[in-house]
Image (tube, helix red, strand yellow):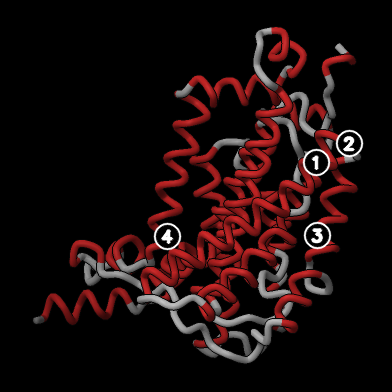
């Protein structure tokens, strides 16, 4: 009994709460960053992640409100709907950037504006009457293997939701896929030297389409993390710029899946910090906006640091990132 009380006291400490909240708030960033990683490894820069996350958030919330079934079934279906919605948005970007060879930066920005807080996601939320109602079902913390009460590690690792554990599986899958499988090595070749990959018989266009679309699906799931777990409801602009952080996170992680996890939780800690400080009454003398802006300040610092082409090459950016390719131009 004494041990349980001691563990409970430790787990209520500020540091443990920050660590557990970092995992919670970092999970949508992790999904979106893994999706952006897949797209960028194929050579496609996707700046429409924020729009894809918002569309995933609103469609996932709509699905959980409208689809009948038990909680687990309804939530699984909602995630699938969010993934499909994000993939469809990414398919638009892929068509513009790969087939029409539009400027990838312009295409991504246009997609975010089209689907963003003042665009499609807002229209869907209002037209479907989603605002103001709590989610019928939401992802809640599990007690994995009965270890949720362990000191420190319990709340951080064993008392998270199914979305967190799904994100860990995705990190492992993406990391192994890109480094240990032939299709993964092919997609890296497409991102580094598409002309050489094409000469070897690798379908550059097909690889870019598939991985950009898969990246959009992961971004849609990341958006659904907000409407089905963190804030189980729908409000305009629910993701709050998380898509932009995810884009910077891929650079921060040197285009590696395992480092995306570390970076996502670091950014997640900065996102959770203002809420925890407010809950403890420690923000009385410091404007809350100072802490709220920390994730975005870090994003700007990362982007400025690696803005030069030389820095990108040193960090491991795909050499053909953002560059259109067609066979006739070899």
Q: Residue at x 69, y 53 (%)?
A: 88
* Residue linked to disc 3: 112
Circle 1: element type:
helix
Residue 107: percent from left, percent from top = 86, 48
**Observer-nearest residue: 324 or 176?**
324
Q: Residue at x 47, y 67 (%)?
A: 24
Q: Decide: marks 3, 4 in contact (CB < 8 A)?
A: no
> Of discs 1 and 4, which sits in the foreground?
1
Q: Decide: marks 3, 2 in contact (CB < 8 A)?
A: no
* Residue linked to disc 2: 100
Q: Decide: marks 1, 4 in contact (CB < 8 A)?
A: no
**Crowdedness near tag 1: few (<14), some (14–19) or many (≥20) residues, C-alpha within 10 Å:** some
**Crowdedness near tag 3: few (<14), some (14–19) or many (≥20) residues, C-alpha within 10 Å:** many
Q: Earlier in the sequence, mark 2 or mark 1?
A: 1
* Residue linked to disc 1: 95
Q: Residue at x 80, y 27 (%)?
A: 310
Q: Earlier in the sequence, mark 3 or mark 1?
A: 1
**Observer-nearest residue: 66 or 133?**
66
Q: Decide: marks 2, 1 in contact (CB < 8 A)?
A: yes
């Amino acid at each position: 009994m004494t041990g349980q009380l001691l563990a409970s006291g430790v787990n209520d400490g500020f540091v443990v709460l920050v660590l557990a909240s970092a995992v919670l708030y970092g999970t949508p960033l992790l999904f979106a960053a893994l999706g952006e990683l897949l797209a960028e490894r194929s050579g496609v820069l996707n700046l429409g992640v924020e729009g894809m996350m918002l569309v995933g958030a609103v469609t996932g919330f709509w699905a959980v409100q409208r689809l009948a079934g038990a909680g687990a079934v309804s939530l699984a279906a909602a995630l699938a709907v969010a993934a499909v919605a994000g993939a469809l948005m990414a398919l638009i970007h892929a068509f513009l950037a790969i087939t029409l060879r539009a400027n990838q930066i312009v295409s991504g920005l246009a997609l975010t504006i089209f689907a963003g807080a003042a665009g499609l996601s807002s229209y869907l939320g209002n037209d479907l009457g989603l605002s103001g109602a709590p989610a019928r079902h939401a992802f809640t913390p599990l007690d994995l293997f009965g270890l949720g009460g362990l000191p420190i590690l319990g709340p951080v690792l064993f008392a998270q939701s199914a979305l967190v554990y799904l994100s860990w599986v995705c990190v492992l899958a993406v990391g192994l896929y890109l480094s240990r499988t032939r299709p993964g090595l092919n997609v890296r070749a497409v991102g580094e030297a598409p002309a050489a990959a094409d000469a070897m018989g690798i379908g550059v266009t097909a690889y870019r389409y598939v991985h950009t679309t898969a990246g959009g699906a992961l971004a849609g799931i990341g958006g659904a993390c907000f409407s089905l777990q963190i804030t189980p409801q729908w409000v305009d602009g629910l993701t709050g710029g998380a898509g932009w952080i995810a884009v910077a996170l891929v650079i921060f992680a040197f285009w590696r899946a395992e480092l995306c996890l570390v970076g996502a939780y670091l950014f997640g800690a900065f996102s959770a910090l203002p809420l925890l400080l407010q809950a403890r009454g420690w923000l009385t003398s410091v404007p809350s906006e100072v802490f709220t802006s920390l994730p975005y300040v870090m994003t700007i610092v990362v982007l400025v640091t690696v803005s030069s082409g030389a820095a990108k090459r040193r960090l491991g950016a795909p050499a053909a990132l953002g560059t259109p390719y067609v066979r006739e131009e070899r």
